[in-house]
Amino acid sequence: MALVPYRASDPWRLLMSLHNEMSRLFGYSFGSFPSFKEEVFAPSVDVWEDKDNVYVETDLPGMEQKDIDLKLKGNSLVISAKKEEAKEEKKKNYYHAERYQGSFYRLMDLPSPVNASKIKASYKNGVLKVTLPKEEEEKSKEVKVKVE
């Protein structure tokens, strides 16, 4: 029996390799096969807190402020947006297009209850920043605990 050396592989690289082979196979038969970038847009989100606030930041490059929708549902923040493709360029025959058009929806559970009436959000240079003030009774208090 021959020994086969173990090669630890990155599962994402293996998945992309499979995707590339499938794209090549279907490209010969049916034309182009959609890539992952064309099908899914899930912007990265950072959530952190201090003693007074919960902060949320997400990158939304190319989005317009009017297309961004924020909602607080219970103890969760919902960020959604829609980016429409401009249909004015009918004469172009694209060979390759990676710029995103479509919509996304993200729901993040917040680590603490927040005061909905004091939420502030700003959108500048493609970055959405949301400040969610914590409820007064939820702000952490320092309590000395006696150890027996």
Image (spheres, grey):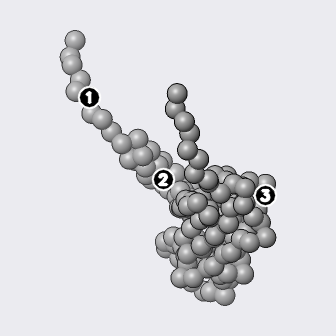
Please, what is the three-letter code of the amino acid marked with disc 2? Answer: Ser
Residue found 54% across the figure and 70% down from its top: 59
Please, what is the three-letter code of the amino acid marked with disc 1? Answer: Tyr
Q: CA distance from mark 2 to mark 3?
A: 40 Å
Q: Nearer the viewer, residue 78 or 61?
A: 78
Report which quarter residue 42 is drawn in.
Answer: bottom right
- Mark 1 or mark 3: which comes first in sequence? 1
Label annotation for residue 23: 2
Please, what is the three-letter code of the amino acid marked with disc 3? Answer: Lys
Residue identified by numbered label 3: 73
**Is residue 94 visible to the viewer in this orientation of the structure?**
yes
Q: CA distance from mark 1 to mark 2?
A: 28 Å
- Mark 1 or mark 2: which comes first in sequence? 1
Decide: few, some or many residues near mark 1? Use Cα within 10 Å; few <14, some 14-19, many ≥20. few
Q: CA distance from mark 1 to mark 3?
A: 48 Å
Residue identified by numbered label 1: 6
Residue 99 lies, in percent from the top left, at 54, 73
Residue 78 lies, in percent from the top left, at 71, 61
In the image, residue 14 sits, relative to residue 105, either above or below, namely above
Q: Nearer the viewer, residue 54 or 142?
A: 142
Residue found 30% across the figure and 35% down from its top: 8
Left or right of 62 in this view: 77: right
Report which quarter residue 9 is drawn in.
Answer: top left
**Is residue 38 visible to the viewer in this orientation of the structure?**
no
- Mark 2 or mark 3: which comes first in sequence? 2
In the image, residue 61 sits, relative to residue 46, either above or below, namely below
Q: Are marks 1 and 2 in contact (CB under 8 Å)?
A: no
**Secondary structure category for the residue under label 1:** loop
Left or right of 10 in this view: 23: right
